Image: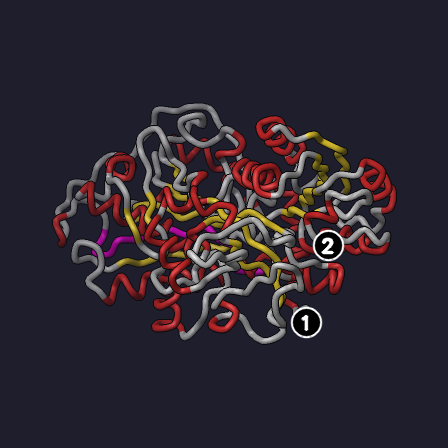
Amino acid sequence: MGINESDLSRRDFMAKASKLGFGTAAMLYLASCGGGDKSDGTDSTDATSKPGGFTGGGEKLKIGVVGIFSGVGAFTGRIVNNSLDAAVTEINATGGIGGRKVEVVKRDTGTDAAAGVKAYQAFAADKDVVGVVWAGAGLAESLAQIERDNMPVVTVFNDLFSYDALYPKGKQRSVFQHAIPDKYNFDTLMKYAKEDRGYTRVGLMYDTLLSPNAKEFFTAAAKKHGITITGVESYQLNDADFGPQVRRLSSARGEALMVWGVAGDTAGLIKSIDKLGSGYVDTPTAKGAGWHPHILGSPGGTGEHTWADLAGSAAKSGTLTAWHMGGLVYLPSFAMRGWMKKHLNKTPTGAEEGPADGLYTILKGVEKAGSTDRGKVVSAIETMGKIKFSSLEFGYTATNHLSKTEDEMILITLERSTGAAKTDPAYQLGVEWKEVFAAGYVGPTHLVRPTLDANRRAHPDVVKELLDLGYGTQCTKHADGSLGKECKVH
C-alpha cells in the first residue's frame, strides 16, 4: 500500500497540532487539558413542553460538534463525519429519541484553538443545543466556560484523565471522556513485557514536543511492574538523525524498547535500529546476548499503519501497540460496521465508534432526564447506567467520568496480508484479513492472547465472538481452544 495525500496530511497535522497542546494519547486521539476559575453560573430551565415527553429545547434534539473538518487535520473530520452521519441516519430512521429527530451542527476549528473556543461559545449561546461532542481544538481553553455553563460535553479525541484534569479530579463536572487514557497505554504494554514475554529490561525513546509526559508515564509503569529501565532517550518532532540515541540504547541492551512518537518519526527510528543489524526478530533473540529489542509503540505511531509503509522491511511482525476493545469496529456484533455499509456504503477505518458513542451519551442523558436542561442531562448521564450503541457497552457514574476501563485494553500487532511471520510454532492471521483488509495491506490487528482474561471479565460476549469466529491473531492455539505463550514473535 503506497503513501497517499491523506497519510501525509496526518503527519503534517501532528506537527502543527503539537503547538496547540495536542498529544499522541491514542491513534487520532488528540490530548489537551487545562482548567479555569470556578464560577456559579448555570443555565436556567426552559419549561416549555415539547413532543416526546421532554421539556425544553427545539423541535429537534440539537447536538453541537467541535471538529477539524479542514486543513491538515481534515482526516479526523472525515472520521467524525462518517461516524455521526451513519449514527444520526440510523437514529432518525428508527424513530429518533423520544419521538424527536436528532440534528448535529458541526463547527470547524481547523487546528486553531481560538476557533474551538468560538465554536463552543456559539453552541453555549444556543438554548436548543443540549450538549457538545468534542473532537477538535480548543478544549483546554474552553474548560472554564464549560464549567460555568454546565454544558454536557463528551470528549472523544481528548485525554483529560491522564493529566488528572477529568472530574472529579478536574473541576468540570459536565465533561465526560470517551478516549483512551495514555496512562492505560503504558501500563498495558509494560504488563505485557513483564508477564507475557518475561522481559525485565525495557528502554524508552520519546518525542518531547508531542509527548512531554511519556517519561513520567513510562517510569511509573516500569516501577509498578518491576521492570528495570535501561535507558530513556528523547528527540524532537521530525528529527532525522537518531544515531546517538540508538547507540546509547544499544549499549544498554534492553530487551524491549517503547517508542512514543508519530508514525513518520517512529519509522525513521526503526530504520536506524535496523541499519545496525539490531531489528527485532523474536522474544528469544530479544533476550539474547545482542540487542534486538521488541518494539512497543504508541497508538499514534506503531498503531497507525503508515509507519509500516514508511519503514518498509524494517517494520517487523510482532511490533505491539495498546488499543481498546471498542475499537474493533469490524466485529459483526458492533453496529457501526453495518450502519456505515447501509447508510454510507463505506467500511470503518478505525475510531468511528467514538463520535457516535459520544453523541449517544448525550441523547440518552436527555431521554433519561426527560428534559433538555443541561444540568439535568449531566445528572442523568451520571445515573443512567450502562448503554450500548455503536460498539461496546459503556457508562459513567457520579464519581467516574471515564467510559474506558483497564480491563478493556487490548494489544494490536503489526501483520501483513501476505501472511504470518515464519516462526515455530506457527500462527495464523484472523479472519479480518479476508473480510476487511485489502491485498498488500500492512498494519495493526488485534493480538488476542495477552489481555484475554481481563477482556473476558469486561465483555465475555465479545471475547466469545472473537474466539468462535476467529477474529484477531490467536497464536498459539491449543487443541482445547486455549491460547498459550509459545509463539516466539508475540
Q: Secondary structure at mark 1?
A: loop
State the residue lying farthest toward the front: 479
Q: Which residue is mark 2?
A: 281
Instruction: Please name the residue shown 81% across and 42% down the image.
Output: 289
Amino acid type of the residue that numbered disc 2 sits on in the rendered structure: Val
Q: Position of residue 148 (x, y in %)?
A: 38, 31
> Above or below — where is 472 with respect to 130?
below
Q: Which numbered tag is attached to residue 482? A: none
Mark sitting earlier along the chain (2/1):
1
User: Callout 1, which amino acid?
Assistant: Gly
How far apart marks 2 and 1 lie (CA) works out to 25 Å
Q: Is residue 115 visible?
A: no
- How crowded is the residue under tag 1: few (<14 C-alpha within 10 Å), some, or many (20+)? few
Q: In the figure, is residue 138 to the left or right of 59?
A: right
What's the magenta region?
A: 58-70
121 displayed left or right of 240: left
**Residue 249 image point, x, y percent:** 81, 39
* Above/below status of 425 relative to 380: below
User: Based on the displayed image, in which of its 4 quarters is residue 259 positioned?
Assistant: top right
Q: How many marks?
A: 2
- Which residue matches tag 1? 2
